[in-house]
Image: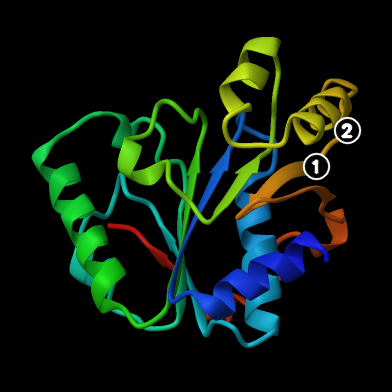
Amino acid sequence: MKVLDRIKAITINNNIILTSVIGLSGTGKTNFALWLSEKLLNDNLYDDVKLVNLEENLDEKAIFDSKNTIYIFDDVTYLLSKHSKEIDKFLRALMLARHSIERAMFIFISHYSTSTLPVLRSAHVRVVSSITSVYELRQYAKLFNTDALWDFYQRFIKLERYIFLVNALGFHAIIKIPLSNLYKIKFSKIEVLSA
């Protein structure tokens, strides 16, 4: 089974999917989210994609107003690392949305796994776009297969680009996104939410 097939199966069997994409700036996290969204849209598993900039838009009514949608929360690292009334309001809306929206995938993109709030660390699908040290290897040892982690680390430090280590509910794989597929989602299906 390919990891993409595993993600599709998870999507078919669960109404709400949480996906966490973590890595250094410039390692393709947003590209991965858009690539995955394109694949799921092409298979008619979702109808729409919303790119949400939380620094500019914390209006939960505007964010969570759609059904059968993929929500991409790009770069939540620093914004969600601290508590505030606005963040608490957003997290409450997210928890309510998880129970009231018929079907959705939430993709949270961040730079460090430990910098985001614990509520967003739990995920059906975990993706890493970079590992730069043995310290990071140890951090991810609880979330990924040791052999897959080591293989990914060796490939990453040899400067292989657009590779991703994916854990889709226990199914681990390293994938490489073809550069020709990046950002090919029909922009009519993407709504960018910002102030």
The secondary structure type at the circle numbered 1 is strand
Q: Which residue is found at the position 13% from the left and 51% from the top?
A: 89
| 58 with respect to 71 (left or right) | left
Could you tell me which quadrant the N terminus lies in? bottom right
Mark 2, Cα crowd under 10 Å, few <14 / some 14-19 / many 20+, is few
Task: Mark yes or no: residue 74 visible.
Answer: yes
Mark 2 sits on what residue?
160
Along the viewing direction, whichever of 125 and 181 lies nearer the viewer: 125
Q: Position of residue 169 (x, y in %)?
A: 60, 55
Q: Position of residue 120 (x, y in %)?
A: 37, 45
Under mark 2, the amino acid is Glu
Mark 1 sits on what residue?
163
User: For residue 162, what is the image quadrant?
Assistant: top right
Q: Which residue is found at the position 69% from the left and 13% from the top?
A: 133
Under mark 1, the amino acid is Ile
146 vs 76: above or below: above
Instruction: Tell whether label 2 touches label 1 (CB within 8 Å).
Output: yes
